[in-house]
Amino acid sequence: MPTPLPPFDLDLLRTFVTIVDCGGFTRAAERLGRTQSTISLQIKRLEDGLGKRVFERKGNGLALTPEGEILFASARRLLQMANETCARLMEPDVGGTVRLGTPEDFATVHLPDVLWRFARAHPQVNLQVNCDFTANLLDGFSRGEYDLILCKREPQGTSAGTRVWREPLVWAGSARLLIDAGGPVPLVLAPYPDIYRKRALDALDAAGRPWRIIYTSPSLAGVQAAVRAGLGITILPKEMVVAGFHILGAERGLPDLADTEVALYRAPGTLPKAADLLAEHIVRSLEGAHGSVPG
C-alpha cells in the first residue's frame, strides 16, 4: 500500500504557524478572523493527517511536541515559498517605485532577505529604501515622503499601523567593560531622537541609577564598536547581541527593560499596487516571526 502524502494543506499550515506565533489558540483565532472552534478543528485535521500530535498541554499553555518542532522548522518556509510563487504568477507585471523608510538596525539585520524575495518576485518594481531614526521617519511620512515606513514604538496594540515585530531589549556590554559599582553607568547610545536612547535614560532614572553618556554614534556599527572596546554599555534587541557581547542585568544593578515593537505604517489614501504588495509581503514575512513557541 503506498504511503499517503503528508497533509501539507497551506491553510492548515498557516493556522499552525499562527498559533505558535501568537502563543495560543485564542489569539490566533483573533488574528485569522476565525472562531476558536474552527482553529481547533483545523489542528485536529492536521494531526489526524500526520498521525502525530503537534501540540501538547504544558501548565496553563501549549508547547510543541518533538514532531511539532520538526514541522514548525519547515512550515514557515513553505508558506513563504507559496506566497512568492503566487506573487510571481498572479502579479508578474507590477511595476513602479515604492518609497520605504526603516530604522537602520532593523534594515541591517531583518530586512535584506525580505526585500530580496520581494525584488525577485517583482523585478519591475523600483525599491527606494531610506534608513533613519523613527522620529525622522515619522516626520518624513507626515510630509508625504514615504509610501511605507517601519518604525519603532512603545507597544500600542492595533491602535495605529500594523505591528509586525516584537523586540525584547537587553543591556549589552563586552568582557572589557569596567563599571564602578558606586559610579554612574557609562552609556554608548545613538543620538536624540533614538527610541532606545530614551528607553535607556528613562529606565535608569526610574531605578535611581546615575548615568553618563560617554560615546554617541548614529550608526549601529559605531555603537557596537564602542561597546566592544569596553567604553560602556548600550541597549540592543536581544537578537542583535553579537559574539563578544554579554547580556547584563540585575547583577550589575541594571533595571529590566520592557519590549518595544516595530510597526508598519501605510501612507493615507490609495497606494500604488506595488506599495500594497510590498506592505503585504512585509507583514506576511515578519508578523509574529519573533513570537516564541507557546509555553
Image (cartoon, rainbow, N blue to C red):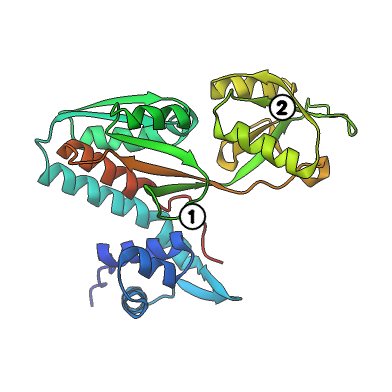
Residue 187: assigned label:
2
Q: Is residue 27 left or right of residue 293?
A: left
Determine whether 218 is above or below 105 in the image: above
Q: Which of 66/147 is in front?
A: 147
Which residue is at the far right?
A: 182
- Quarter of the image with the N terminus is bottom left
Instruction: Name the residue beneath numbered marker 1.
Output: 291
Q: Is residue 160 left or right of residue 195?
A: left
Amino acid found under the numbered disc labelled 1: Gly
Instruction: Say whether residue 242 is visible.
Output: no
Amino acid found under the numbered disc labelled 2: Leu
Instruction: Say whether residue 60 is visible.
Output: yes
Question: Mark 1: which secondary structure?
Answer: loop
The residue located at (36%, 24%) in the rendering is 130
Q: Which of 123/218 is in front?
A: 218
Asked where in the image residue 91 lies, by quadrant, the reply is top left
Determine whether 280 is above or below 39 in the image: above
